[in-house]
Image (cartoon, helix red, strand yellow):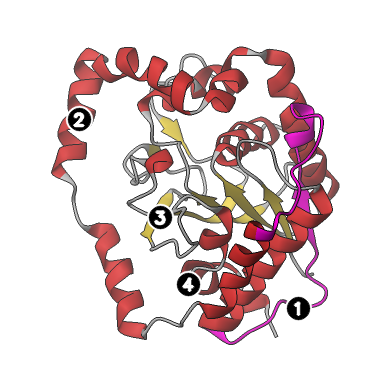
Amino acid sequence: MYPIIIAIHGRGNKLPTTTLSALWQQALKHGLQCYNQSQLHPQIDFKMAYYADHFYQQPLVLSAATKTSIRHIYSVKQLPPQHHQQLLLSTSTPRWGTKIAEWIENKLSVFSFVAKPFLKSLLPDIHHYFHDANYQHAVEQPLVKLLNQYQHRPIILLSHSMGTVIAYNVLHQLSRQTTPPQISTWFTFGSPLGLTSVKGFLPKITQQPSVKALATPDCVTEQWINVSDKRDIVCIDHDLSDDYLANRHQIKPKDCYITNDYPGNSHKSYGYLWSHVIAKYGIPKVTL
């Protein structure tokens, strides 16, 4: 049985769902071709969990500038294999500053107090998601419906930015179902799941208020790949592997660093989608 790719976009207003879905597939296919010399099997479906229309009345228009930026994918050059290895090896390097900050937070909860106004000003959509139950429910439903609709198939879940927070909550909810969906691979791109201000709200929205340590949702069965660019301020805490425990399948986040090649925006979804990490961890075993 061939898997299905389900994607959920990030915060802010977006292009219409069919346009956005086509551009994500275009970026994904280009990355596979560039770094893995492969193509998606025609029986692998792609579905977009689109939620921007729950907040914005009119979608964005595909401007000339956007079209020029999208064409940039055809100029992305394949990195040499040794560069890929250097990127992957760097994921195991300890970051002592992060360790010290986490120790201070665990003892004093200093950053939780400071980070809440930071979240409200920098990521208002996520702040709204945490504080408005109706909005939270509305933006979760497209992903919930798709995951339940295709629960009989292996699922590759692609999530970006705020979409990673929504996905984390939804996956925990669905893991409690009698027949939960099976997420073979979960990709998080440019994720704020490492931010103290975000982690503090997660036990509440996942309906586990007594949880002290966060963990990988149980319906993730094979791998959770967390991809970030160290210039991307949204995922300023780039390492999720020390924030989230393994689930019952012994799956925990694997952190991978890339250079997001999208022109002028190290947080852009397209730049993450065409990166070598997708070709290495995501789809090679089910491509032509």
Label located before the other in sequence (1 or 3): 1
Coordinates of residue 138 in the picture (x, y in percent) = 77, 25
Coordinates of residue 24 in the picture (x, y in percent) = 68, 60
Give residue 68's quadrant in the image: bottom right
Residue linked to disc 3: 254
Q: Residue at x 33, y 40 (%)?
A: 237
* Residue 56 magenta: yes
Inspect this view and state whether residue 119 appears: yes
Q: Are marks 1 and 4 in contact (CB under 8 Å)?
A: no
Which of labels 3 and 2 is toward the front? 2
Q: Residue at x 70, y 86 (%)?
A: 288
Which of labels 1 and 4 is toward the front? 4
* Residue 172 magenta: no
Give residue 92's quadrant in the image: bottom left
Q: Tag 3: residue type?
A: Lys
What's the mark number on residue 276? 4
Residue linked to disc 2: 101
Q: What is the distance, in whole Å, between disc 4 and disc 2 at their CAs? A: 31 Å
- Nearer the observer, 203 or 14: 14
Is the residue marked by circle 1 packed among few (<14), some (14-19), or many (20+) residues within 10 Å?
few
Q: Tag 4: residue type?
A: His
What's the mark number on residue 41? 1
* 158 sits to left or right of 242: right
Q: What is the distance, in whole Å, between disc 3 and disc 2 at their CAs? A: 21 Å
- Nearer the observer, 90 or 120: 120
Q: What is the distance, in whole Å, between disc 1 and disc 4 at their CAs? A: 18 Å
